[in-house]
Structures are given as C-alpha cells and as structure tokens.
Amino acid sequence: MTDDRRQEKLKAKARWTRKDLLSVEELSREEIELILTTAESFKEVSTRDVKKVPVLRGKTIANLFFEPSTRTRTSFEVAAKRLSADIINFSSTGSSTSKGESLADTAKNIEAMHVDTIVMRHSSSGSAEYLARCVKAGVINAGDGIHEHPTQGLLDIFTMREKKKSIKGLRVCLVGDILHSRVARSNIWGLKKLGARITLCGPPTLIPPGIEKLGVEVTYDLDSVIKDQDVLNILRIQLERQKGAFFPSIREYAAEYGISQERMLKAKKDVIVMHPGPINRGVELASEVADGPQSVILDQVTNGVAVRMAVLFHTTMAER
Amino acid sequence: MKTLIKNGHLVDPKNQIDGLMDVLIESTRIKKVAQSITEKAEIVIDAQGKIVCPGLIDVHVHLRLPGFEYKETIETGLRAALKGGFTGVCPMPNTNPIVDRRSDIEFLIGEARRVALGRIWPVGAVTLKEEGRELTEFGELKKGGAVALSDDGHPVSDSNILRRACEYSRKFDLVIMVHCQDEGLFCDGCMNEGFVSTRLGLPGIPVESESIEVARDIQLADLTGARLHFCHISSKKSLDLIREAKARGSRVTAETCPHYFHLTEEAVLHYNTNAKMNPPLRTEADVQAIKQSLKDGTIDIISTDHAPHTESEKEAEFDKAPFGIIGLETSLALSLTLVEEKVLSVSDLVMKMSVKPAEILRIDHGHLSEGAAADVTIFDPKLEWIVEKEKLESKSKNSPFLGWRMRGKATDVLVDGRILLKDGEILDK
C-alpha cells in the first residue's frame, strides 16, 4: 500500500473530531477502537527501512514537559517524526516557568509560534483540560498529576489486545499504588468501555475512595486473585510514598505486592505481565519476571510509538 | 431630618413584628414603628411589595485590607456588601499583616469611617500572626473595636493554646470563631474526598478533617465555658455533633454559607476553580443536612465567607488556585430560596442574617426598636436578576454563581439613617 493510499484510507475511516486527547474517560468505545485500529496500521511503519510516512508533513508539534520524563517524551518525539511532523521540545527546567510564568502564558507563547498540537505532561491533575481551554491548538495529555495518562492507557490496551486478541471478558489486575496512578485511571476507563473484568490490588492505603463505583473489584490480597488473571499490569511504586505513611517499608511492600518468580507460579501459564516503566527492579517486579517470557514490557514501548502516532494523527488532522 | 419607610412588610423578629408596618427614622435612630404613619418626613421610601428588616450582618468576610488590596479593599468590599443588602460585615484578620494588635483594628475602623459605605466590626486574631503560639491582647483588641476573635484560615491546632484562649476570652465575653480543620487529615487536599476526587485525581479532604476539630472544640467549649462559634460548617457529621452539643447546653453556635446548601462537590467537575473553597463543597446528603440544620436551629447564622481572589489567581491549575469564593452580592438571593423551599420563613431568615449575628457579636443591632440605630435593609423578594461579572461591585469576580438566575435583591439600604443604596444603586457621597 502506498503512503498516499494509506492516508486516504485513514481519512475515510476517521470519525474522529477531537483536537484534544485529555482523558480516556471522555472517549467512546468507538473512538478507542479507532485509535487502536489506526495504531495497528501505523505499527508497520516503524519496521520499514525508511521509517516515515508524510501524513503530518508541515505540522508542528510541541512537547511541553513540566515533569521529568524520558520514555513518554521520546515516544511522542519518535511518533511525530515518523509522521513527518516537526517536533520541538520544551522542558520546565531552565525555561520561563522557573521564572514564575503561568501555564497559560507559557502555552500561549508556544501557540503564538503556530504550533498545531501541544503534548503536555504536568504535575497538576486537570492541567491538560485547563490548557485545552486556554489555547486553540490541540492538546494531548501526556500525564496530568494523578488524573490520567491516556496514551499509556491506550497503548496498554493495544498491547493486551495484540497478545490476547480480545478485551471483552479479559481479566486484568492492576497491582500497586492505584491512588496516585494516572496510568491506573486511564486503564480502568478504557478497559471498562471494552468489556474487561478489572481487579485492583494494592494496600488499603493506596486504593482511592469510591473507586468501586467504576465497576471494578478491589482486593488487598494479591495471592488470592493472581491465579484468575489474564493480565497483570504492575504499577510503579514511588519510593517517596513511604514518607506519607502509605506503607511502612519497601521491603514489606515487595513482600506483599511484588511480582516475584515464586508468585508467578500461582498465575496462569499464559498470563502477560505489563509495566508502564520505569521499573523498580526487585520492588514491584522481580528482574526474572521483568525479563522473562511472560513479560510484554518492551512490546508496550514499541506499541507506544504506534499508538501515539495514531493519536497525533487523529488529533492534529481534526477540524479546528 | 426624617425618613419614612412606607407600605413595606416589616420583619423584625426581635420585636415579634411580621406584617405591614411603617418605619419612621429621625436622624440616625428609629423614631417610630407603626401602621400607617402619617407624620411628615423629608424623604419617603415606598416599600410596597418589599420586605423591610433590620440591617443584614455578615459575620464572616475577607476584605483583604491590608496587604491584598489587589483582591479587595474596604471600599470595594463594602460596596459589594451594600449591593447584597448588608449594613455591616465582620472582616477576618488573615490579612498581611495579620490583624493582631489594637492599632490594626483601629486602622480598619478608621478606613471604614472614611469610606462611609457601611459598618465593619473587625475580628481580631486569637494568636499573634495566627501562628497558634502566643495569645493576642484580647482586651486591647476589644477596646479598639474588635467584636470577636478568630485565626480563620487556620485552626488553632494546639489544644492547650485554644483552651487558654477560650478561658481568657471569658473575661471579655468575646466569642471565638473557630475554623475547624485537622491539619494532618487536610494534608494537601483541595476538594472533598470521595468518588469525584478519585475521578478527577485531586487530593481529597475528608469530612473528618472538619468534624474531628468540631468534636474537639465542643469539648473545649464545655471545659472552659467560653463561647465558641463554628465558622462555615460544611458537613452532616459536624452538624450532628453541634446539634448534640447544643442539646446538652454547650455554648456553641454555628454558621454555614449559601454555597454549602446550593452546590455539591460535582461543581468541581472540569476543574472549576470557582468551586474551590475551604472547607470544600460536599455531597447531596450534606446539603440536605445543612438545610435541616438551618430549619431546626443547629445552624444559627448564614454568613458568606466572602473570599475575593483575582481572575489571574483563579485562572490556574486546580491544585495551585487559591481557596475561596466571593459571596456578598449573591447571599440574600441564594438564601431566599430556603424560603421558597419552605425550609425557613422570612422571619427565620432575618434571624440568621441579622438578629443572631448581632446577638453573637454582642452588638446592639439586629432589631428596629424605637431608639435603635437606623440600620435597615429593604429587599424585593421577587425581583429577578442574573449574576453578571461586569455588574459585581467586588473587585474580584470569583463566583461559582456567575450566570445564575436569581430571585430577590436588596433595593434600599440605610445605615445610621443614611440611605446608601437606593433602588439598587449605591449612592456615592
């Protein structure tokens, strides 16, 4: 298939009207499936000798990262480049935000350079939605506080679908710090819309209040649920949470919720193990498991580029 | 000079008046209250179809002077108060510097006198710089004109300091207005803790942050015999404790604000920073409990906690935006809905917005007895209007009620017999 034909096909299929991707919560099942389908066709681009299609040629995308991130920022950068967009990087260190400039002013300055889409990571929940209200450019949420990380949620679901064929009826367990996890929230919304059965597992201190209202099961005991799961999505534990009295020690956390080789013996043979990275090896995930046959962690990274290509494509091409 | 208010429906609960009655004012005092007064007066106000009542008093506002004049001043705050039908307000001391000395109180009162747009009764700090460590000079503050004490914005976390403040306050019969907040539970919260905070990914403030301190403060009121007043109560849990304490005879009183009986935590959805205040908006069950408590008398006062912040401060990421909303200009209309819903009678409402505030502050206001200061509010309970940013008198516009259709508005306000608001317009000097 030539690039021109691919572009036509994509355009024809697009029922996408959003210039922004702020959350998975706001997406319909059809919109999620559209992104996943588009990502499937973009995935092949990255395996070519010439890893580039001209679909976003002449478009400018800005990475605006107020929190340190290598993986997500790079993934967006690679995705944009493979779509032939120009991408520029702003990071908070050394930029005007450290001189007290407001988020709205920073964004408006970037927009004044005729940027089409802004990819933002920020420590405040809701900052992406706020930014979208401030600017006419498209906004892609690359993680806002503990609210959502929609592209991570979508790439996780993409990977689950790739490995397990269908999401409907799939048993997915999210393990760890659900309370502070934007990845968990995006996973939950997306997986629910596609019909998965979700179990949240973590210490009682790290389960957000009222989360059962989303139609998920909650357990504090990993060993009692691990055997039923098709997918274990392990969340990164932030070591500084210990100071907030969420758990007494890393050692005890690892003993109760770490995915060790021994614990894996209780799981289904064909379970897949996922992690959004970066991994605390030996804490939430044993090295043997992270590098073992059931781990799909590097597939997630590969798929992340494809999913972000799909997201950048649809949002940037949406009517303004 | 004489002013006659004719044909109005006078509601003066303290004098058990609730009916058609004229009010004659001579100079700064009420001269006569009777049906169909025929005496000649230089000024006649026709209050046909309107309610005439003792001037409304807001015991809890932030006028931001000194230190935060870009948000509000005595002048703009009093203009907002007049529009809202208030003849007097109590500015809280959490300014910069904190109002913790007699001279600070005197400065505020002098400023209000200069502005001449209504009364202020300042609240002095309980502790120096509101740091919760050393007591302020209660006697001096009172001599300067303070009518109450509060470290509003913060709790007095050290129970022993609050105990001593309570004990010492008895000498001066000053009420201590407590802002109930357990600092540990409050943590870095910025909205009510629950399903909505989980969905939005915002750090939550549990109801218990308020109710635990309410429980403690009731015990301290009982221990010391001091008069404690609970500021801006937002939750059923706190109200249950206060109701029980009052039944036992504790010397506690309580206030709530219109936003706590009009809005729930759902108003925060889409990260609306104009729905961010402390304590936070709670749930529908709390709203119902507040209405019940207004009805059964557990809540004595409707205040506003008028907290001006500029648009550039509120235009920010939700967790970075300051707490607080303005309320002076919308309070009366929002409270009149309680009359429509049959939660309160008009007389009850005047109790909660004028009589009780005066009683708790120990000021001789809140009634229109002959010889009393002629502070009068006249409002049209049926007048419909829309809350428009451009028309607000407050320097700040941070209201969650912008665009709301309201019913009921002050048309005329007299302070010391002087008409300051006439037909809904402020009369400048």
Image (spheres, coloured by chain):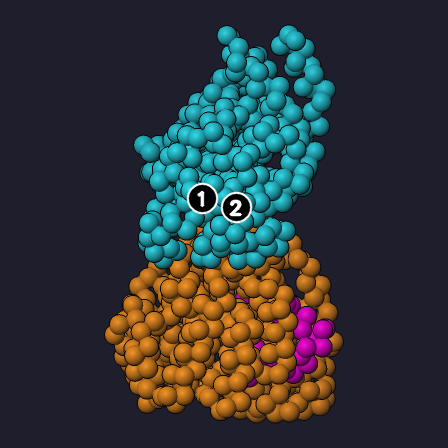
Chain colours: A cyan, B orange
Query: Residue B343 in the image: x percent, y percent?
Result: 68, 77
Q: Which residue lies at the image location 33% right of the left edge and 38% below the top edge?
A: A99
Q: Main secondary structure of the magenta part?
A: helix
Specify the label residue A226 is tagged with: 2
Q: Return the residue nearer the eye: B420 or A218.
A: A218
Q: Which residue lies at the image location 42% right of the left edge and 68% below the top edge?
A: B181
Specify the label residue A263 is tagged with: 1
Q: Is residue B289 visible?
A: yes
Q: Is residue B221 above or below residue B315?
A: below
Q: Return the residue nearer the eye: A48 or A150.
A: A48
Query: Residue B150 in the image: x percent, y percent?
Result: 38, 74
Q: How crowded is the residue under tag 2: few (<14 C-alpha within 10 Å), some, or many (20+)?
A: many
Quarter-wise, where is residue B382 in the image? bottom right
Quarter-wise, where is residue A231 in the image? top right
Badge 2: chain ID: A
Q: In the displayed structure, does residue A320 sit left or right of residue B203? A: right
Looking at this view, name the residue that lies furthest to the left.
B134
Query: Residue B122 in the image: x percent, y percent?
Result: 40, 74
Mark 1 and mark 2 in contact? Answer it, CB < 8 Å: yes
Q: Is residue A109 above or below residue B60?
A: above
Same subunit, labels 1 and 2: the answer reads yes
Quadrant location of the N terminus of chain B in the rendered image: bottom right
Q: Which residue lies at the image location 47% right of the left edge and 29% below the top edge?
A: A293
| Local SS, label 1 | helix
Residue A224 sits inside the magenta stretch = no
